[in-house]
Image (tube, rainbow, N blue to C red):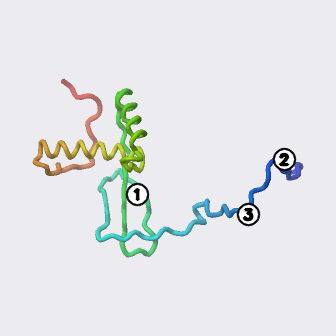
Amino acid sequence: MSDETPNRQIGGLTPRAGAHDLSRLQARNRPEPKPETSEQPKTVASPAAKPSRTPAKNSATVVVDTTARMTTYLSVATRDRARATYRATTHIEGDKSWSDFVERAILAEVERRELSHNAGERYQGDSSPLPAGRPLS
C-alpha cells in the first residue's frame, strides 16, 4: 500500500470477537523451554551432525539430540510404496515424521543384520564417507 491510500476495511467481513495477541508467534516473544531432565544425556556422535535443539540456559543437565542429513536414492516404486505405507499407518504406529519412519526402518534392518551376522553385537562405526557410486563387479 502506498502512503497516499488511507486504511480501508474489506467489506463483507465481520471482525472476530475478542482481540487475539499474536506476538507469541514470533520466536523472540516465546518463553524459554523448560530443561529436560534425565539421568544421562542422550547423544549421537557424528561430526556432520547438527543440534536439533539447544539446551536451556543455566540448566544442570545438558541434553543434546543430534541429527544428520543423509541423501539416498531409491527406485520410484519403492519410494512410492514407502510413502503410501507411511501415510496409511503413521497414526497407528505413532511416527513423529517421515524422517522418523525412515530412521526406524533403517534401524530395524541394521538390528536384523547385526543379529544375523555379528551375534547381535553392534558393528564399530565411524563417520568416514562411504564409497561413492556403484561397486565394481
Residue type indicated by callout 1: Pro
Query: Dot 2 corresponds to which residue?
Result: 11
Mark earlier in primary sequence (3, 1): 3
Residue at the extreme top of the image, as rendered: 137
Q: Which mark is residue 51?
A: 1
Mark earlier in primary sequence (3, 2): 2
Circle nearer the viewer, 3 or 1: 3
Report the front residue among 62 and 79. 79
- The percent coordinates of residue 43 (x first, y second) are 31, 60
Mark earlier in primary sequence (2, 1): 2
Instruction: Give the distance between the C-alpha atoms of the residues marked 3 and 2, in whole angstroms.
Output: 19 Å
Q: Residue at x 29, y 68 (%)?
A: 40
Q: Residue at x 43, y 39 (%)?
A: 87
Q: Quadrant of residue 134?
A: top left
Q: Which mark is residue 18?
A: 3
Circle nearer the viewer, 2 or 1: 2
Secondary structure, mark 1, is strand
Q: Quadrant of residue 78?
A: top left
Instruction: Give the distance between the C-alpha atoms of the residues marked 3 and 1, in whole angstroms.
Output: 39 Å
Secondary structure, mark 2, is loop
Instruction: Note whether 120 is above or below 35 in the view shown.
Output: above
Q: Is residue 99 left or right of residue 3?
A: left
Residue type indicated by callout 2: Gly
Q: Is residue 20 left or right of residue 110?
A: right
Q: Quadrant of residue 83?
A: top left
Q: Residue at x 13, y 42 (%)?
A: 116
